[in-house]
Amino acid sequence: MIIIGLMSGTSADAIDAALCEITGEPPALNARLIHKATKPYPVKLRERIQHASTREARVDLITVLTMELGEAFADAALLLMREARVRPAAVDLIASHGQTVWHAVESDGRVRGTLQIGEAAVIAEMTGITTINNFSARDVAAHGQGAPLTAYADWLLLRHPTRWRAVQNIGSIASITFLPPHSDDTSAPIAFDTGPGCVLIDGVVSALTSGVKHFDRDGAMASVGQVDHALLAYLLDDPYFDRNPPKTTGRELYSEALAADIVKMGQSRGLKPEDIAATVTAFTARSIAYAYSRFAPASIEEAVIGGGGTRNRTLMEMLGKAIDPVHMIRHEDIGIDGGAKDALVLALMAHETWYHRPANLPALTGAARRVVLGQITPGRNYPELIRRTWL
C-alpha cells in the first residue's frame, strides 16, 4: 500500500510528512520511504497549540483549533504529494498522529486519557484519501499508556541479530525502547518515556531570552556554560525516574512553568544564563542515562539515537559521556531516515489498522491485550480501496 504518514511532535514546530510503501505482514513487514517533506507551523499557530496544551486552555478555542490543524495536516499531505509528483488517487491511506495537547497521567502512573487534535474528517475531505487517526486512544482503552507506540515498529524493524540494542528518541520528551536480539526468542522488549528531551531546554532558553530564541541551536548556549551540580541533583530528584515502566509523561509534567521555575532557581543561585542552559541540558542527558542503569534488562552495547535532540551537539556530547561505554549511532547508520522515522511508523501502523491487525505490544505499553489501533475516516477512495484490498 502507498500511505502518507503525518507526524507533529510535542514541540509543535512542524508537521513531518512521509510518503511510504508498506508491504507484507508481521513479522516480515517492510516499510520503504519514497519521499518526505516538512511543513513548519506559523509562529501564531504554534503559540496557540502550546496554549492549548495548558490547563488554562478554553474548550471553544480547542474546538476551532482542531479543525484548523486538520487543514494544516491536509496541506502537509498535499505539499508532499506535489513534491513527490504523486496524484492523490495513487495514495491509499493517510495516517495522522494529530497534535497531542494533553496526556492525563495519574500520580500512580495510570493514564486516564489522551487527546490528540487535528480533525481527520477535514484531512479526508481536503485530500479525498481515507484517513486513520487517534492511534493512542485504543491502547489507553485497553489500560495501556498509549505510548510510545513507535516502539512496535522498533520491534519489527530495528532488532540486532545478536546484541541487545536501545532505540533512543529525543524529541520534546525522550523515550526509549530496549530491544532483545533476534537470537533471543524469550526476552520481551521494554519501552517507556525516560523524561524530558528538549522541552525544558527550549523552555529555559525561551525564558532566558524573553522569547527571542525558542531553542538552543547546536547547544551553543549550553556549550559555554558550567553545570551547577546542586541544581542538577535537585532536578534529578524526581519520583518519575524511579517509577517502573511502562510509563509515559509529557508537557503536563515538564511544562513551561517548570522551565520558568528552573530559570528562577538558577538566577537565585547567581548562575549565568549559559550555566542554566548547561544545567538543564545535563538534566536531559543524565535522566536518559539513569534509565539505562535503572531499567535496562541486559547489557546494552548500542543505542540508535533519533529525534530533534540529535541536532543539539552539547546534549549529544553529554549523553555520550553519561551512557559510556554504550556506542551511539544514528538511524541513518542502519539505513533509516531519522527525520522521517516517526511519520513512516505511522504509515506502518495505519497499514496494520486497515488489515485489522494489532499494532501495540502489551510489553511496551502495559495494555491488557493487543488491540487494533486508530479510527478510520473514509475518503472518496474508500469504496475502491475496499474492493481492491478486501474483496
Image: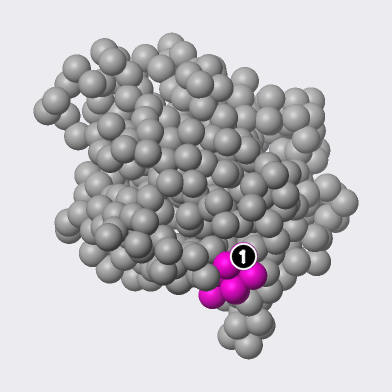
Q: Horizontal placement of 180 versus 384: left or right? A: left
Q: Residue at x 47, y 24 (%)?
A: 304
Q: Amino acid at mark 1?
A: Thr
- In the orientation shown, which residue stands out farthest toward the bottom? 60
Q: Horizontal placement of 345 versus 256: left or right? A: left
Is residue 379 visible from the viewing direction of this image? Answer: yes
Tell how many labels. 1
Magenta includes 121?
yes
- In the orientation shown, which residue stands out farthest toward the left? 186
Q: Horizontal placement of 46 versus 350: left or right? A: right
- In this rendered view, identify the residue nearer to me: 111 or 226: 111
Q: Residue at x 61, y 57 (%)?
A: 88
Q: Which residue is mark 1?
A: 127
Q: Which corner quadrant holds the C terminus?
A: bottom left
Start and end of the magenta stretch? 120-128
Q: Residue at x 33, y 51 (%)?
A: 352
Q: Position of residue 296 (x, y in %)?
A: 30, 29
Q: Residue at x 17, y 21 (%)?
A: 184
Q: Position of residue 114 (x, y in %)?
A: 42, 67
Magenta includes 344?
no
Q: Horizontal placement of 289 versus 84: left or right? A: left
- In this rendered view, identify the residue nearer to me: 90 or 6: 90
> Helix or strand or loop: what does disc 1 sit on?
helix
Q: Main secondary structure of the magenta part?
A: helix
The answer to whether 47 is drawn above or below residue 325 in the figure is below
